[in-house]
């Protein structure tokens, strides 16, 4: 997913899209995930997480080189939709698997797992930006990353929990409606994921169009965000155990708000990069806390609860950037970033729901 971030300005320039048209194309990404996630929760409950992680992970890798070659807006939209479907399947099954592992261990592990997701964000954006900066053709770079990811999925397959022998398999009941709190947690995830989506799809465009950074280097803004998020998540389990989940949500949201305002209103490349760091640190542990809580809700199988929270959350990650595009077209991208900060203020004010 992060390898796509540095490709966004190239796709926009190649197809001659304005901000609203790019936002509409990105909506297909979110639409694909939103359609797949509820079904994946049911499939993961029935078939197991490992099967879905491997199958959808391999199929997802096909999208990257196709995105680099899409020559029409329709081809871009279709490929982004397919990419979103496969990404949604991976994310639901992966987080449900993480809940199983965390329950087997008995401690707090979710922030650490999401920290590795952020390391992937750093690696994808930095490697792709580096390849483009030294002159590697876009299609070649995307194809090379896809091949590496296929090999990684196949290598990690044997390390995943056996679908038929996990400790929680005996607890998997019949399919039913998720716990009401799963919906509340999902709405809070929406705002946090929207902040992440803003970084994924708009950080490179912002640096190029508003701060004068070259297109080949604009992806390093997302890399700064990912470094900060990985740092926050890799240390997050220890901090949450010491200060509690409410503190993690409230302080994290406040930091992210400061970061967005710094990016939006201080006209400096250095300050923008610093703002991306604050956003990454602030948002780092909000979603892991929400997912961990959703996976432990009583009376709801973990895969179903995770699918509910993830579906609402990824509406922010994948569909939110399209909304940012519309707001930016109507006003400006800095104003859209400030609006995201307003949503995060609501998350901070609602932090006590995590404790409940």
Image (cartoon, rainbow, N blue to C red):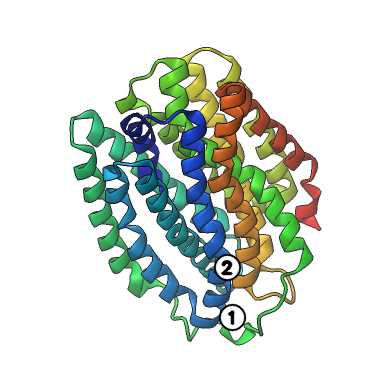
Task: Locate the C terminus and report the quarter of the image it occupies.
Answer: bottom right
* Residue 160 placement (x, y as % from top left): 41, 72
Q: Which residue is mark 1?
A: 168
Q: Circles 1 and 2: CB distance less than 8 Å?
A: yes
Can residue 286 be seen? yes
Does 226 appear above or below 266? below
Question: Which of 313 and 238 lies nearest the eye of the viewer?
Answer: 313
Quadrant of the rendered structure where residue 35 is? bottom right
Q: Residues within 10 Å of mark 1 (few under 14, many from 20)?
A: some
Q: Residue at x 44, y 81 (%)?
A: 162
Question: Which of 130 and 296 lies nearest the eye of the viewer?
Answer: 130
* Residue 298 placement (x, y as % from top left): 74, 73
Q: Residues within 10 Å of mark 2 (few under 14, many from 20)?
A: many
* Residue 338 placement (x, y as % from top left): 65, 26
Q: Residue at x 52, y 75 (%)?
A: 44
Spatial separation of the CA atoms under disc 1 and disc 2: 10 Å
Question: Which of 151 and 180 lies nearest the eye of the viewer?
Answer: 180
The kind of secondary structure element at disc 1 is loop
Q: Which residue is mark 2?
A: 99
* Residue 20 placement (x, y as % from top left): 52, 32
Q: Earlier in the sequence, mark 1 or mark 2?
A: 2
* Mark identifier at residue 127: none
Q: Is residue 109 left or right of residue 78?
A: right
Q: Residue at x 56, y 46 (%)?
A: 319
Does 157 appear above or below 191? below
Does 158 appear above or below 7? below
Does 82 appear above or below 208? below
């Amino acid at each position: 997913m992060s390898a796509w971030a540095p490709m966004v300005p190239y796709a926009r320039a190649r197809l001659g899209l304005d901000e609203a048209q790019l936002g509409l194309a990105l909506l297909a990404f979110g639409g694909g995930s939103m359609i797949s996630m509820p079904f994946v929760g049911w499939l993961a409950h029935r078939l197991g997480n490992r099967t879905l992680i491997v199958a959808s992970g391999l199929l997802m890798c096909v999208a990257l080189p196709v995105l680099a070659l899409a020559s029409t807006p329709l081809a871009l939209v279709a490929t982004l939709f397919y990419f979103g479907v496969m990404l949604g399947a991976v994310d639901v099954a992966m987080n449900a698997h993480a809940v199983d592992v965390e329950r087997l261990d008995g401690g707090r592990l979710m922030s650490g797992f999401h920290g590795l997701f952020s390391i992937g964000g750093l690696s994808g954006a930095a490697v792709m930006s580096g390849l483009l900066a030294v002159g590697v053709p876009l299609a070649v770079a995307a194809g090379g990353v896809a091949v590496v990811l296929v090999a990684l999925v196949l290598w990690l397959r044997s390390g995943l929990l056996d679908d038929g022998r996990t400790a929680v398999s005996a607890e998997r009941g019949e399919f039913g409606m998720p716990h009401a709190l799963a919906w509340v947690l999902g709405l809070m995830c929406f705002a946090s994921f929207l902040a992440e989506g803003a970084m994924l799809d708009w950080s490179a465009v912002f640096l190029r169009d508003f701060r004068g950074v070259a297109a080949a280097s604009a992806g390093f803004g997302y890399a700064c965000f990912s470094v900060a998020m990985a740092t926050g998540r890799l240390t997050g389990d220890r901090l949450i155990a010491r200060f509690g989940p409410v503190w993690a949500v409230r302080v994290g949201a406040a930091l992210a708000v400061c970061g967005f305002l710094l990016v939006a209103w201080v006209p400096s490349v250095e300050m923008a990069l610093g703002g991306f760091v604050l956003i990454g640190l602030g948002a780092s542990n909000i979603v892991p806390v929400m997912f961990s809580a959703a996976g432990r809700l009583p009376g709801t199988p973990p895969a179903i609860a995770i699918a509910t929270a993830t579906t609402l959350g990824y509406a922010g990650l994948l569909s939110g950037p399209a909304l940012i595009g519309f707001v930016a077209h109507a006003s400006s991208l800095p104003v859209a970033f400030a609006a995201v900060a307003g949503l995060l203020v609501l998350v901070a004010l609602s932090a006590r729901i995590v404790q409940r």
